[in-house]
Image (cartoon, rainbow, N blue to C red):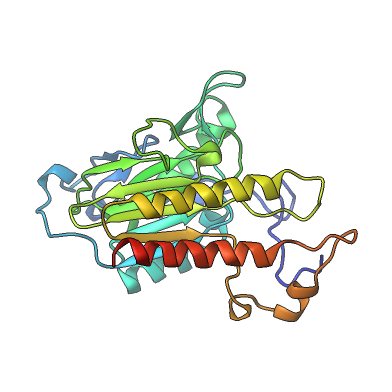
Amino acid sequence: MKRFFKPIEKEGSSSNKKPTLNSLPPVAAAAGAGADGDGKASQGEGGAGAEELEEKGEPTKFLTWNANSLLLRVKNDWCDFANLVRTLDPDVISIQEVRMPAAGPKGAPKNPSELKDDTSSSREEKQVLIRALSSPPFGSYRVWWSLSDSKYAGTALFIKKQFQPKKVSFCLERTASKHEPDGRVILAEFESYFILNTYAPNNGWKEEENSFKRRRKWDKRILDFVQKVEKPLIWCGDLNVSHQDIDVSHPDFFSSAKLNGYIPPNKEARLWTTRIYHGREAAFQ
């Protein structure tokens, strides 16, 4: 498949030196609290704890971003992203493709809510990321993680500390305490609405892959979720679908793309997206 964008260089390559603590800007005391590996706010020098912040209603501004490795973004694009956040001043930031592994040693059950730190390399990477998230303007956000077992997929949700969600869960079945496989869902409930951050699985390209069946199962679960949720829903994330031709950079290429004679089932994916949208509308009419 032809690449239209410069690929991200693999971690560990000579041209992609791993970021270090010294490569990041110093943490200002005024930044307040940072974020622990479990996504809970930690007290910073000179900053008030989240419990001391005055309640100021509910979030009204939202930013969503597929980071394609948050650690690489810390090295390559963090200043630009920080400036964007300062300019837009979102109340909520939804991140997809965090690509940081969940806590837990090899072969043991993992904790998707915490960053891995049981090896020297994972501890260094965690420190780099936490320091970046403690620097302005990110120190004013509390962070929730839902991570995969490896450097794959994963989501994060940043919410300004003056906004206190009633509940944060990590599965489309809201009564379950588990996380979705690969950390694909974070759901925050407020008094007036829900905020849903998802990283949807893709359809795949090869007919022998299970990706298409996995995606159809995901679509059915999402449809069931949006039809049953009892409050208005703000849905952020990477949905891995191009609903209309205007949503892709090169519609002619993607509409005729083939690999080994197999045509990706984009039309069916579009139908599911339309059905989910109209199903959600019908639920509130």
Q: Quadrant of residue 278?
A: bottom left
In the depicted structure, whether residue 115 falls above or below residue 84: above
* Residue 183 position within the rendered picture, expressed as x and y whole percent measured from the top left: 50, 41
Q: Is residue 166 left or right of residue 136?
A: left
- The residue lying at 28 percent from left, 60 percent from top is 232
Decide which of 21, 278 is in the foreground and name it: 278
Q: Is residue 140 visible?
A: yes
In this rendering, the count of numbered labels is 0
Q: Quadrant of the N terminus?
A: bottom right
Q: Residue furthest top?
A: 108
- The residue lying at 26 percent from left, 46 percent from top is 33
Q: Is residue 53 left or right of residue 210?
A: left
* Residue 110 position within the rendered picture, expressed as x and y whole percent measured from the top left: 51, 26
Decide which of 153, 120 is in the foreground and name it: 153
Q: Quadrant of residue 90?
A: bottom left
- The residue lying at 33 percent from left, 69 percent from top is 86
Q: Residue furthest right?
A: 260
Decide which of 215, 102 is in the foreground and name it: 215
Q: Quadrant of the C terminus?
A: bottom left
Q: Is residue 26 visible?
A: no
Decide which of 91, 16 is in the foreground and name it: 91
In the depicted structure, whether residue 67 falls above or below residue 244: above
* Residue 244 position within the rendered picture, expressed as x and y whole percent measured from the top left: 59, 76
Q: Quadrant of residue 192?
A: bottom left
* Residue 124 position within the rendered picture, expressed as x and y whole percent measured from the top left: 52, 36
